[in-house]
Amino acid sequence: MGLSLSAYLEELHGRSDLIWPEPPAWVPLKITPALKPLPGIKAVTWSVYGTLLNIDQGRLLHQHPQEIRMQIALEKTIKEFNMWYSMTRKQGQPWEGMLHQYNKFRDEMGLKSTKRKGDFPEIDSANLWKKIIERLQKKEYSYDEGMYGDIDDFAAKVAYFFHASLQGVQAADGARETLGELTSLGIRQGLLADGQIFTLPQCLFAFKQQGNFSSLAEVLSAECMTISYQVKLIKPSPSFYASAVESFSKIGIQPEEVLHVSHRLKDDLAEAKKLGFRTALFAADKASCNVTGSDVRDPELKPDRLISKVSQVQEIVRG
């Protein structure tokens, strides 16, 4: 059976022999929040990386622009899962050979065709690592199934380890408390987010660092979830948002009754706005929220509300 992903994260981060990267501190933007209540809001959807979770670059990356970060993450992954002995021997360092394989599979997955013009395929990180593991198994690679589970479960854990070694995360200030307060107000909540199979366990672990928090099911509704790895599309794919509209319609909620919160304006909130969602721009970090004054005044982009703290969403929905 193996450890669940959530249990694996707990075990992993309880070890003293591993050092994880820290997300950079947010550099505040000089903004005046716009918090006038929006009447009729029944649900709130959140972007994850860069909004609920502080992360380097403001989003989860498959390829970091700093090669040294890729090197460190791959070296740690190879060592952690004893992959070296089943790797093909080539000139150069082991991480360079792994990077070549990783990039090959990443490029192939990123070039998959989509059914609708303007859609962009998601790269499923667990599936990418499964391909690498299957190649290693041709050279007698094995792992502890009692701890890690079957190959799909194992690949998900390897994917998490790699990404956690590449980019550190931390829950945004007040995230855990805000999710709880919105639930107490009767507001349904979900994710409308780029994310991987490990994203929900990663959120749970991060929120626990802010205080007692036993389950995401306490604050997030399964019916309100649209995560990129599940629909195989990333933002700003039109079909990604159309899928969210369909999910909400099944529970009797219309797009104009949903407030979508994100730090990404042009490639997230703007697309959600086209389909009728109300929008709130989370402008807390100069590095990840790349917007200008003209952007937020543009009628096609302008968010309904502007916040600098996730807790301010409570003021917007109380109306």
Image (tube, rainbow, N blue to C red):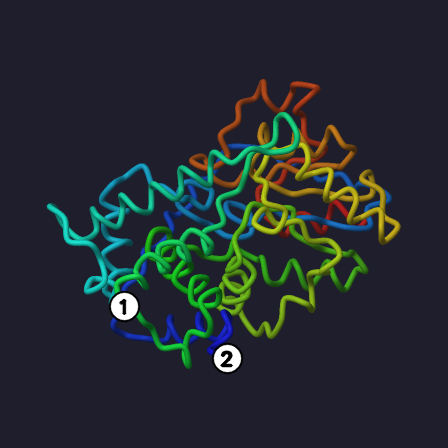
Residue where numbered disc 2 is placed: 1
Is residue 53 shown above or below 255? below
Q: Position of residue 194 (x, y in %)?
A: 56, 45
Q: Position of residue 279 (x, y in %)?
A: 70, 37
Residue type of the residue flagged with mark 2: Met
Label drawn at residue 140 = 1
Quick check: 74 left or right of 148? left
Which residue is rendered at x = 20% and y = 62% of the image? 84
Q: Residue furthest right?
A: 252
Earlier in the chain: of badge 1 and badge 2, it is: 2
Is residue 104 shown above or below 229? above
Which residue is rendered at x = 64% and y = 36% of the image? 306
Residue type of the residue flagged with mark 1: Glu
Which residue is rendered at x = 59% and y = 62% of the image? 176
Disc 2 on helix, strand or loop? loop
Quick check: 182 left or right of 311? right
Is residue 204 shown above or below 287? below
Q: Position of residue 112 (x, y in %)?
A: 51, 36
Answer few, some or many: residues within 10 Å of disc 1's Cα (few below 14, many 20 plus, some between 14 and 19): few
Disc 1 on helix, strand or loop? loop
Quadrant in which residue 139 is drawn: bottom left
Which residue is rendered at x = 63% and y = 25% of the image? 117
Count of residue discs:
2
Quick check: 308 left or right of 78? right
